[in-house]
Image (spheres, rainbow, N blue to C red):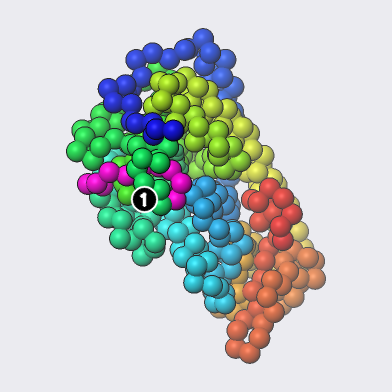
Amino acid sequence: MAPVHYHEGRFPPRELDWPRLIPLIGPAAAAVARYDGMLAAVPNPDILLSPLTTQEAVLSSRIEGTQATMGEVLEFEAGREDISPERREDIREVLNYRAAMREAERLLAELPLSQRVIREMHRVLLDGVRGQNKAPGEYRRIPNWIGPSGCAIEQARFVPIGADKLPDAMSAWERYLHEEAPDRLIQLAILHAEFEALHPFLDGNGRLGRMLVPLFLWQKGLIRRPMFYLSAWLEAHRDEYYERLLAVSRDDDWTGWCGFFLEAVRTQAEENLRRTQAILELHGSLKLRLPEMTRSQYAVHALEWLFARPIFSASDFVQMAGIPAPTARRFLGVLKKHKIIKELMESSGRRSAVLVFPALLNIAEGREVF
Ligand SMILES: Nc1ncnc2c1ncn2[C@@H]1O[C@H](COP(=O)(O)OP(=O)(O)OP(=O)(O)O)[C@@H](O)[C@H]1O
């Protein structure tokens, strides 16, 4: 089949089938608002929700074929070294994803979401990984296409806009980003689809387009922190995700794409709310139990450490948790005895044991993994 080409002159869409979309907008917006209400109750979302943030980076990267799991990423951070070179690359991509989000948050404290911010995020995303030779931080100057790996342009499924037209098209995209559109979620759906159809970079377009989701919701005041996790749903519906994007250019079916996106937002807002609530409850119950178990003023220190680093090396805990070393060693024994933590890797020689806090990671994974 001949490739579908970019929908030149048809962005932003002139009309949408609003009667079809309106019944979907209310529930999606309400679910986002409920999730935001839950975010308000989280005392330190950067720490408490960090496993969800890591899991999002893992899943968004997995859509493009990166194989690393959240456990592997966190074990790597805890100092595990026996990891194959390919897996190390995958892990690095996930860590870059998180770093790009952090960089965006830092920049957005002073700048509006813009092409400049997106290019900076791209630079961080591709730093030192497979796409390093793919012009980090710069728009492409050559054609690219989407299709089976390594295929010729004739075999492509989709051919994005020509490189010569890209700068103007990105300016139009940015203008639309700053418009006061009738509905923010529809605006976001359109922005994501247009970004993917333009495919402005040689690599990393899918991931950047998905990072846009929490950043936009945050900047437009729909959520109070840039934490919204959409990729689990997109990964589970990947074929339909790609097909709906294709149908925008092929059939001008913006409405179909927007409906799909609203369903993704509603489902994930509900899921995000459930997981955030479960994390909050876990934190609340351990805040009561840990002081009883340890009979120590340092119990809360230990708790914060566990939430910030749910996989960690015993020696890091003893040296860096801000707890006197003998007390920290005693804590590890008590936490193991009460099955709050368990050993993922025994100590051997000079290498310290690697420990895991399963309850938290299982909530982030949505199933029993540890
Ligand atoms: N038909 C399509 N039209 C527009 N965008 C599409 C289409 N099919 C897939 N996409 C988007 O392109 C992304 C993947 O693009 P591609 O395989 O070229 O990866 P990439 O540009 O290297 O970026 P990354 O690897 O981070 O996603 C998908 O995640 C999806 O968002």
Query: Residue 164's x, y, as percent?
Result: 19, 38
Please determine whether, in this image, residue 297 is positioned above or below residue 70. Answer: below
The residue sitting at 57% across, 43% down in the picture is 235
Q: In terms of depth relative to the viewer, which is nearer, 363 or 164?
A: 164
Query: Residue 310's x, y, as percent?
Result: 62, 62
Check disc 1: other Cα within 10 Å, few if <14, some if 14-19, many if 20+: many
Query: Residue 13's x, y, as percent?
Result: 36, 19
Q: In terms of depth relative to the viewer, which is nearer, 197 or 72?
A: 197
- 109 part of magenta stretch: no
The residue sitting at 51% across, 56% down in the picture is 66
- Residue 160, visible in the rendered structure: yes
Quarter occupied by residue 126: bottom left
Please determine whether, in this image, residue 263 is positioned above or below residue 336. Answer: above
Residue 13 in the figure: left or right of residue 189: left
Q: In terms of depth relative to the viewer, which is nearer, 72 or 47?
A: 72
User: Is the residue marked 1 within 8 Å of ligand 1, measured from its CB?
Assistant: yes
Residue 346 in the figure: left or right of residue 47: right
The residue sitting at 30% across, 42% down in the picture is 200
Residue type at numbered disc 1: Asp
Quarter occupied by residue 41: top right
The residue sitting at 49% across, 49% down in the picture is 64
Magenta region: 139-149
Locate ligand 1 by image quadrant: top left
Mark 1 lies on residue: 203
- Farthest residue toward the bottom? 349
- 140 part of magenta stretch: yes
Query: Residue 34's x, y, as percent?
Result: 59, 30
